[in-house]
Amino acid sequence: MTDPLIWAPINLGRWFGTQVRLHIFLVVFVVVVLLNALIAQEPRFLATAAWISLLLVALVIHELAHAMVAAWTGGEPPEEIQLWPLGNMACQPSVTRSPDHILVVLAGPLANASMAILTALILAIFNAQFVWNPFGNVHDSGAPLLLATNLPAAPFKPLWWLGWFGYLNYVMMVINLIPALPFDGGRLFRLFLANSSVNHARDGYYGVWTAHTCAALLVVIGVIRVVSAHPDGLLLISLAIPIELIVRSEVKLMDDGGYFEDGVFGYDFSEGYTSLEANAAKVRPYRESAIKRWRRRRSDLRRQRRQAREAAEERRMDEILEKLHREGRHALTDEEHRFLVRVSVKYRNRPKAHD
């Protein structure tokens, strides 16, 4: 597979009619994090494996929230889910904005936020402080701080499990608010642009350049964190990679005349949570995207300018040929002679039409 955006090598089977696969980004993330913890020390490896398992639970909650709200609003379950560390990579932004579609997009982050708030309340009851800093605490990232000792909860204790679970849900919610694909914030931003922009030829620019800006900011902040001896800076830089890959793929598809249907993002939200029907093929009306509209208009302008230039050259050629016939070759100026030679060569090299 040459495109990492659609590479989901591990098949987990069909769950409630939906094909579930593990995306290569999730596989690489788990392997790299576990190897790094293994090199460090064994207790850290066990703790890392534990919070990764909690991350997978938070990921399932996130996707179930999307699917349940889609079903509640009358949609169908997605044909395929490609799980990566922060959601589903096989998603496409909808071109239709409606309250139901917005609810479907928001369902995942809201579910994670609910888990985080509930966890924070329970921790407060047991005199522990939830980790509200997305970068985690300096001792054990998501481990809650015990107010009695001013130390983080010991690994594998009930409060440790609870704190890490809420922290991971909180981080997943925060990151999914980034207004760039493949995050839910990016899908919501595209939903807004699809119907709110007055100048439709420019609405695609907002989405594309917002994604580029988000990727650049993540890289800058990540580099600053790395220089400041914070290893989580590498994770921020890695978040910029799928954003940039997707936006580049989007622009390339539009340049080639493509349209996001079942390709990079798999399904869309225009019919609840998916555009696929379970029993019969459904043809969705084609709607030209803003980027493609701008590309088409720019191509039309180039073609019109070329046609106008060719028409002017033909008129000039007729005038020169008429002068040549009337007055002879010696009457042509140097500029007219160069023009005659240049245009003659151009017409002679033009591809011939075949019947």
Image (cartoon, rainbow, N blue to C red):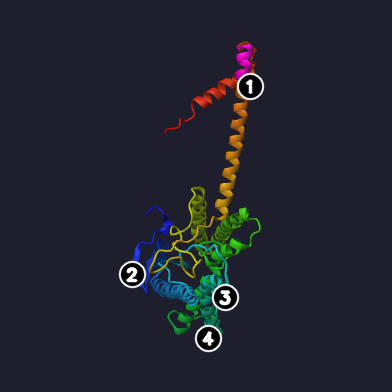
**260 in the magenta segment:** no
Q: How many numbered discs?
A: 4
Q: Amino acid at mark 4?
A: Ile
> Which residue occupies 38% across, 62% down?
8
Tag nearer the camera, 1 or 4: 1
**Mark 3 vs mark 4, CA separation in Å:** 14 Å
The crowding category of the residue bearing disc 3, from other C-alpha atoms within 10 Å (few below 14, some 14 to 19, many at least 20), is some
State how far apart marks 2 and 1 are (Cα): 73 Å
Q: CA distance from mark 4 to mark 2?
A: 35 Å
The answer to which of 5 and 19 lies nearer the viewer is 19
Q: Is residue 323 magenta?
A: yes
State yes or no: discs 2 and 1 in contact (Cβ < 8 Å). Answer: no
Toward which corner of the image does residue 13 lie, by quadrant?
bottom left
Upstream in the sequence, badge 3 or badge 1?
Answer: 3
Q: In front of the other: label 3 or label 2?
A: 2
Which amino acid does the dot numbered 2 rest on? Gly
Residue drawn at x 60%, y 14% is 325
Mark 1: few, some, or many residues within 10 Å (few <14, many ≥20)?
few
Residue identifier under label 2: 13
Looking at the image, tell me whether mark 2 or mark 1 is earlier in sequence order: 2
Amino acid tagged 3: Trp
Q: Are marks 1 and 4 in contact (CB under 8 Å)?
A: no
Q: Quadrant of the C terminus?
A: top left
Whether pointer 4 and pointer 2 mark residues with C-beta atoms closer than 8 Å, the reply is no
Residue tagged 3: 132
